[in-house]
Amino acid sequence: MVYTRRDVSSLTRAERRRFVAALLEIKRRGEYDDFVRMHIEYYVSDGDDGLRTAHMAPSFLPWHRRFLLDLERALRRVDPSVTVPYWDWTRSRTPSAAPWTADLLGGNGRRSDHRVMSGPFAYGNGKWKIKEGVTDVEYLTRDFGRPRDPIKLPTAAELARALDDPVYDAHPWNSTSARGFRNRLEGWGTGSGSGAWRNHNRVHRWVGGHMLGGASVNDPVFWLHHAFVDLLWTRWQRKHRGARYLPASPPGPGSSQYGRIVARHEAMPPWNVTPNQLEDVGGIYRYA
């Protein structure tokens, strides 16, 4: 049966409690840290050798769609009523609004070391120890807005510029692609400050702390952020009827991207699934 993902700000108190409880339970079981390890492993950049599937590539959107589905299935094995809510960062923009409430994800990190002190994922509660990361810090960290070098969340107008692009992706199919919805949404820009990070990427940097880099899954807001990114892909598809994932065919041997990106009908590691198979998930879930 098709289920619904909803805006986190619309959840009832009971729905918030059940979502948090399911996250804490898969963390207790050790399943959650498997997701962290996978994201670290597949955080491959333009400058690295080999295939890129999760970032800086056309498959950014279908890869994270499947990743999010796997997490959601793990949560629903604990509680079948749970779905992953989305955080619309163009509307819910203050540190006191959902999802940053004490009954959901807790708030910002403290000034001295960015350690999150409130909410169910605070280290002091004993249920959310960071075990997989790029540092030895065991507590969840955040640094909203990066006060020492301020950065703002993307606006609705900035997001609209991505949604207006009628082409899914374009050569050279990486972080330097100047055209295409995928990179306008993923958000690799040029320059410094907010201009260097657009949309998806800037949200990671606005949250800060563990949301920076490959270990970003350690912060549960990762899933709410990517649920919204996933919703934006569906909105783009509705806006540009008939537009498809690109490239349709893999780049040839003479291309710098030969063997480095996934075409529409190629299997996308680590799953045996193609971007084509993930373009329409209307039979699994919908968005309210």
Image (tube, helix red, strand yellow):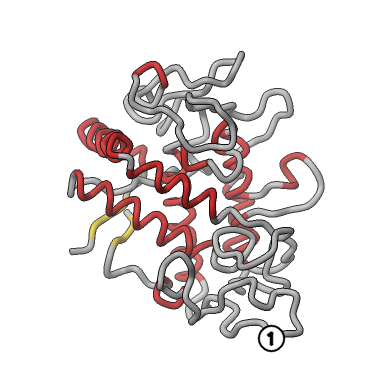
From this view, report whether residue 260 is shown above or below residue 88. below
From this view, report whether residue 174 is shown above or below residue 208. below
**Residue 100 visible in the displayed image:** yes
From this view, report whether residue 265 is shown above or below residue 220. below
Q: Position of residue 284 (x, y in %)?
A: 27, 65
Q: Alpha-carbon neighbours of circle 1 within 10 Å: few (<14), some, or many (≥20)?
A: few
Q: Is residue 61 left or right of residue 189?
A: left
Which quarter of the rendered picture does the N terminus lie within?
bottom left
Q: Is residue 251 left or right of residue 42?
A: right
From this view, report whether residue 138 is shown above or below residue 34. above
Residue at 42% in and 46% down: 223
The answer to which quarter of the image holds residue 78 is top left
Which quarter of the rendered picture does the C terminus lie within?
bottom left
Q: Is residue 245 left or right of residue 24?
A: right
**Residue closer to the observer: 40 or 63:** 40
**Residue closer to the observer: 121 or 284:** 121
Residue at 68% in and 34% down: 151
Q: Amino acid at mark 1?
A: Gly
Q: Is residue 30 left or right of residue 262?
A: left
Q: Position of residue 224 (x, y in %)?
A: 42, 44
As drawn, the residue found furthest toward the right would be 191
Dot 1 corresponds to which residue? 252
Q: Which secondary structure, mark 1?
A: loop
